[in-house]
Structures are given as C-alpha cells and as structure tokens.
Image (cartoon, rainbow, N blue to C red):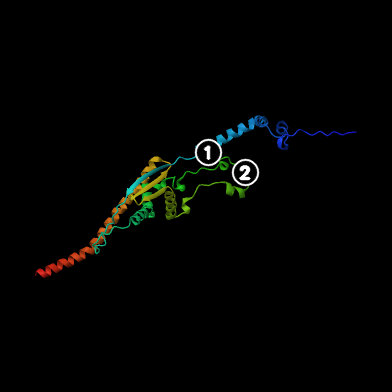
Amino acid sequence: MTLQLSAPPLTPFGRQPADEAESDGISLGQVFGVLWRRRVLLLSAVIGITLAGFLVVKSLTPAFTSTAIVVVSARPDNIVNLEDASLQTADSDGIIRSEVDALTSRTLVDRVIDREKLMDDPEFNIYARPFRPNLLTRLGIVDDLPEAMQHYLRNKPLDPSRLTPAQLKYNVASAVMKAYDVSSDAKTYSVKVSFTSIDAEKAARVANAFVEEYMKAQVDDQIAASDKAAAWLNPKLAELSKKVADTSQ
C-alpha cells in the first residue's frame, strides 16, 4: 500500500499564490464597508468638530494693534554740563536704550492712564467691569448645593475697596503694559510704539498718547535742564558783572 501526500503549490521563493495570501488580509473593500457602516458616527464627529471650532472662533475677541514711530535725535543735548565745551556724540545703542527705557517707564504709563481715563476702562480695570454671574449661579443650581460647595462655585462681584488706590492703579498699569510694546532700531534711530486693544480707535488713540506724553516729558526735562543751567550760570554772570564794574571805577 502506497501513501501519496499532496502539498499546496508554491510560487518562486516558496510563497503561496496571491489569491490565498490576500484572503488572509484585509481588502480595501472591507475597509470601505466598515466606514460605510459607521457613516453616521463619522459624519456626526465631523459636524461636531466643525461646529465646536466655529463656536471657539466666534467667541474670540478681535484685537487691533496701532503703531507709532518716534525718531530719536542722534546727538545728546549738553545743556547742563556747560563746563564741558566739547560736544561728544554718544553711542547709538546707548541713546536708543535710554529712550526705550523712558518710553516704558511706569511714570509715563501713569500719565497716559490719567490722560485717557483708563482707570474707568473695563478693558484694563477688571473692577470696572459689569458683574456677570456664572451659569450655575444664574440657573440657581448653586443654591441647592451644600454650603461648602457654594463658597467655591458661586461667583461674586469684585470689591475694589479691598485695594488701596495705589494698588488699584498698579493693577491697571500692569494690564496696560501687557498691551503696550516698544521696539527699537539702532541703525535708523527710530523707536516703534505699539498698543493693542479690542477697539481700533482706542488702540490708535492710546499709542499716540504715549508718544505725545513722551514728547511732553522730553520738553519738561529740557526746561528743567535749562533752569538748572540758568541757576548755575546766573551767579557766574553776576560775579563777572561785579568784576567789570570794579575794574571800570
């Protein structure tokens, strides 16, 4: 009795035929079949993601940035130091840095706050914003919760009386500084002053206010320097006049 064993035909390199190999995997038709059966779920996910993105974009508050350019003088004034007859041109980087420091000083920021009445602006003073209770408070859900949870979930109006006037103005100045930016270019002796606000007209107005107050401060410094120079020079002139009068007698 002879036993005959049969084996599946082999392709080159000992592989099975393509039709048998493909039957063990996942075909493209099967993938499309699964997607078609889940079409409602996939369509719902796409619509949900699109709607969520639209709501997020609509909830974002638009911001506007206005920029003003200040051209800095390359030669410093030597009004006070009259004893130094030579005029020396300072390093450009040093001049630009000093002007940037002046433009970002808290004194200048306070002057702009007072001029533009930003203490009463809800955009920069959170204590001036109207109170809006959260959803849990509006629906009255917080009232049905335990008192320990009500303390954390119920929002209350902010009380500005808890801060001193100096602290309140410091908070407003910090918010203004976040919307305020100063950048310099030593090659062109120019300084860019930018301000960002949710109101385009306000952004332009406050940016110009920073430049104008900066120029006024420069004029005040020049006047103070002139007064200081005059205070130093007047006694010298009086002494010289007295010597001339004595020699003419």
In the rendered image, which residue does mark 1 sit on?
56
To which quarter of the image does residue 245 belong? bottom left
Between residue 46 and residue 20, name the one nearer to us. 20
Q: Residue at x 18, y 64 (%)?
A: 237
Q: Which mark is residue 3?
A: none
Quarter of the picture holding the C terminus: bottom left
Mark closest to the chain's N terminus, 2 or 1? 1
Amino acid tagged 2: Asp
Q: Residue at x 55, y 34 (%)?
A: 50
Between residue 90 and residue 214, name the one nearer to us. 90
Crowd band around label 1 with a 10 angstrom C-alpha radius: few (<14), some (14–19), many (20+): few
Secondary element under disc 2, as helix, strand or loop, is helix
To which quarter of the image does residue 1 belong? top right
Crowd band around label 2 with a 10 angstrom C-alpha radius: few (<14), some (14–19), many (20+): few
Amino acid tagged 1: Val
Q: Measured from the top left, where is residue 143 in percent x and y?
A: 60, 44
Nearer to us of marks 2 and 1 is 1
Relative to 58, 31 lies left or right: right
Between residue 114 and residue 234, name the one nearer to us. 234
Secondary element under disc 1, as helix, strand or loop, is helix
In the rendered image, which residue does mark 2 sit on?
144
